Image (tube, rainbow, N blue to C red):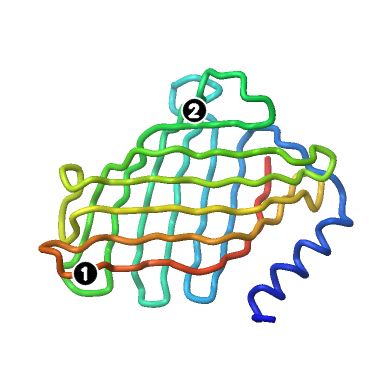
Amino acid sequence: MHPRLGMLAALLLVASVCQAQTDTGGTSAEIALSDETLQLRYIGRGSTIGVDERSRFTGTFFLSEDRDIVLSSALLFPANLDLGRLTLHFGPQLYAALLEEENNDVMTITVGAEARFLLNRGMGLAIAGHAFYGPDILTFGSADSLTDLAARIEIGVASQVIAFGGMRWFEFDLVGGTGKRTLQEELFVGFGYRF
């Protein structure tokens, strides 16, 4: 078994015997690690910036092994649909990237969505993911577009703590069709704390 898959399986096994977690929709902070990346994420209610209480405001710091730094911020609004255990938020996310190479910076405005499907409320077991895309017209600097896709499984490990693991595909299409700059394409694990 691959070491990363073994670590993910062990994390989920330990978490499955821990205390239940419920999704309160409040403020939280997360840390996610992979072999080559670190990400810190803050998730707050939209009311902190003067919009609808049910909306979400996020701020993220991403660092890669190659010293690529990406700051992003999103304002996501809930879909006003009765989807049962599925929650869906959509809206814009702004990315500002300082890439390893000198004078190789990118800024883009993306549109996308985050989804979460609750499998077991008592265990806090859920499947979640996001998809954001920044087209050429809204991407500036040394890239033509941005694609950020992720899927993860979450489980409650304490009354306010979740553990998660998944896969992320995060890349830029470079200017002039010179290829792609992949920031992350690997498994990750992490923890979140709900305030």
Q: Is residue 100 left or right of residue 31?
A: left
Q: Is residue 50 left or right of residue 88?
A: left
Q: Amino acid at mark 1?
A: Gly
How many tags in the picture? 2
Is 57 situated above or below 77?
Answer: below
Whether residues under marks 1 and 2 lie with C-beta atoms below 8 angstroms apart, the answer is no
Q: Residues within 10 Å of mark 1 (few under 14, many from 20)?
A: few
- Residue at the image point whose x is 79% and y is 43% from the top: 21
The x and y percentages for residue 89 are 50, 31
The x and y percentages for residue 50 are 44, 22
Location of residue 85 (image quadrant)? top right
- Residue at the image point whose x is 60% and y is 54% from the top: 152
Is 10 situated above or below 127?
Answer: below
Is 103 situated above or below 92?
Answer: below
* Closer to viewer: mark 1 or mark 2: 1
- Residue at the image point whose x is 65% and y is 80% from the top: 2
> Nearest the camera: 81 or 76?
81
Please name the residue that numbered disc 1 is placed on.
179
The x and y percentages for residue 192 are 65, 51
Residue 62 image label: none
Q: Amino acid at mark 2?
A: Gly
Q: Secondary structure at mark 1?
A: loop
Q: Secondary structure at mark 2?
A: helix
**Mark before the other along the chain sequence, 1 or 2:** 2
- Residue at the image point whose x is 62% and y is 24% from the top: 83
Is 54 situated above or below 88?
Answer: above
Q: Residues within 10 Å of mark 2 (few under 14, many from 20)?
A: some
Residue 46 image label: 2
The x and y percentages for residue 104 are 18, 67
